[in-house]
Image: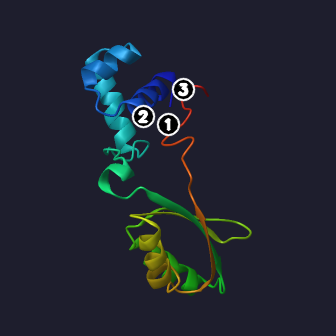
Amino acid sequence: MDAIDRQILAELQNEGRLTVTELADRVRLSAGPCHRRLRELERTGVITGYRAVVDPAAVGLGFEVLVSVTMDREDSTTIAAFEDALAGLPQVRQAERLFGDPDYLLRITTTDMEGYAKFRDDKLAALPGVQRLTSTIVMKRVVKDRPLPIASR
């Protein structure tokens, strides 16, 4: 990957709906070579997809909670069952497995405190292997959806 590929990625992270012509102008290439580079970045999995970023509050899902999960068992069967079940919960916006304690950090989105309490009690606490859940309500996001610092490398 060269500097032009990085510039293509940086431009698309900032504005994913650019046409190939607009993108080519911004990275100072003609449309053909820019299109070939773009397709190669997609083919090799550097670009993993395109999507619309939706404001959660605008669709009634503005209540966010960070949840630390400590497991009571960490055998491969329990971990796989937990992760599979977690993947099936659409309220879980992000989930990371961590080294150390806690074992997982989740970002949950719901309608309000009552919605989260029900989700926590009915769904999260019932997941395989969960020993403890610690919830922290997000007051506000200071930095969100920041692009990767590709061009500044």
Q: Amino acid at mark 1?
A: Pro
Distance between the alpha carbons at the discs numbered 1 and 3: 10 Å
Residue corresponding to mark 2: 13
Chain-order first, disc 2 or disc 1: 2
Q: Position of residue 13 (x, y in %)?
A: 42, 34
Q: Position of residue 58 (x, y in %)?
A: 32, 49
Question: As drawn, which residue projects farthest toward the right?
Answer: 100
Residue corresponding to mark 3: 151
Say the numbered circle drawn on residue 40. none
Distance between the alpha carbons at the discs numbered 2 and 1: 6 Å
Left or right side of 148 for 32: left
Distance between the alpha carbons at the discs numbered 3 and 2: 11 Å
Q: Are marks 1 and 3 in contact (CB under 8 Å)?
A: no
State the residue at coordinates (56%, 40%): 143
Above or below residue 25? Residue 19 is below
Left or right side of 105 for 55: left
Disc 2 residue crowd, few under 14, some 14–19, many 20+, Cα 10 Å:
some
Q: Amino acid at mark 3?
A: Ala
Q: In which image quadrant can residue 115 be found?
A: bottom left
Q: Are marks 2 and 1 in contact (CB under 8 Å)?
A: yes
Identify the element where label 1 is drawn: loop
> 139 and 71: which one is in front?
139
Left or right side of 121 for 59: left
Residue corresponding to mark 1: 147
Identify the element where label 2 is drawn: helix
